[in-house]
Amino acid sequence: MSEIKPLIIGTGSFGSAMAIVLGKSLPNTQIIIWGRRLEIVEDINNNRRNSEYLPPNSLKFPDNIIATNNLQESVKISNIIFIAIPSIFLEKILYSIDLNLNNKILISLVKGIFIKDNQVKNLFTVCELLNNRFPKCDCCVLSGPNIYSDLARGKFAEATIGSYNLDIGNRVKNLFTKHSNFKTNVTFDRFGVEYAGLLKNIISLGCGFIDYIGNVNARAALIRQGIHEMYNFTCTLKIPCPSKKTFFEDACGIGDLILTTHYGRGFILAKEFLKESNIQTEKDCAQIWQEVESILFNNMKIPDIHNCLIIGQNIENRGLTSVFPILNAIYTIAWKKEDPNILLDILFENKKNISK
């Protein structure tokens, strides 16, 4: 690949923050960012801001960032494509791209999971979805403890790049080498990176439930025990197991888990969910989640809730509720109105907290 032609699909908070990071790292390269809404595209191009999704004290978009709402043309002229749209909209947007993407590099910034053939036992990740849609593309994932507001202010952050092709992974890493505040490492364990990213969001929901109860000590126990369940659950999906290093040492694992369980959107949503559940006892869980998304995030769809439902149903369907009591408990609290105090009981009694 000679000339670098990056595209970021998604003008939400994370896509916009990543555009600023990439624009600073590649000051002599034109970078395109695609968004569906014309008013956001115009805000970026005219004011160098994304007033809707980024905080007022964010850095301005560098002059080499060009926003557009023409997806087909943007994809056609780009050779490195970052995907930064919520997982619940991903399939629809991907299948609207009617182009040959052969030999392009796709980088997923998305933490999501999908069901194959309407069978909850059959899960596939974002990169697996991308590879199915565009089989001749190289797909990798970038994941880590990256709160978008700090990224958009140019503050230090680190991330893990997972790629089955280490040469491709290192090419992506090199995109950020001139940005001294954004540190990356590369691993062959793409599968582990994806699952670490989505499962830590479920543990974050659990930490929000515990914080609502009012037990900081238990939150620490949930983080410690939860990461073992994250790893062991992922081992049930792939042989050989993903790398322990991915979960217990890398930015995408323990690093992202620590950050998300203190500041993540799921953590914030979970507390509000329990508050509203106690008030609106007649409403089902889906209605309450929708309302708290509206209250806290202006109707923005937070994938953590949907991912929790899919993973919980998968565990239930495979008869593994006793093997993964923490993940199962978070699911039943979130989707069956189970008493959140069951998490405290599980943390006290849990003996399945050591990785295989």
Image: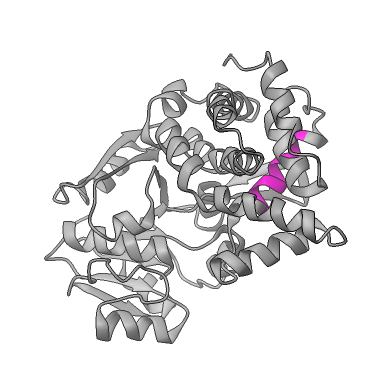
Can residue 192 be seen at all in this image of the molecule? yes
Q: Nearer the viewer, residue 69 or 211?
A: 211
Taking depth in this image into account, of 279 and 118 the one nearest to the observer is: 279
Colour approach in the figure: one colour
Task: Please identify the quadrant where the C terminus is shown.
Answer: top right
Q: Nearer the viewer, residue 169 or 211?
A: 211
Q: Main secondary structure of the magenta part?
A: helix
Q: Looking at the rendering, which quadrant does residue 183 occupy?
A: top left
Q: Residue at x 37, y 48 (%)?
A: 146
Question: Residue 83, percent across and down?
Answer: 43, 59
In the rendered image, the residue lying farthest to the front is 214
| Residue 259 vertical placement versus 218 (above, below) | below
Q: Is residue 268 left or right of residue 149?
A: right
Q: Measuring from the top left, give residue 305's x and y in whole percent.
A: 65, 52
Q: Residue 66, how many percent across, how many down?
A: 27, 77
Any magenta on residue 302? no
Judging depth in this view, the residue of 26 and 222 nearest the camera is: 222
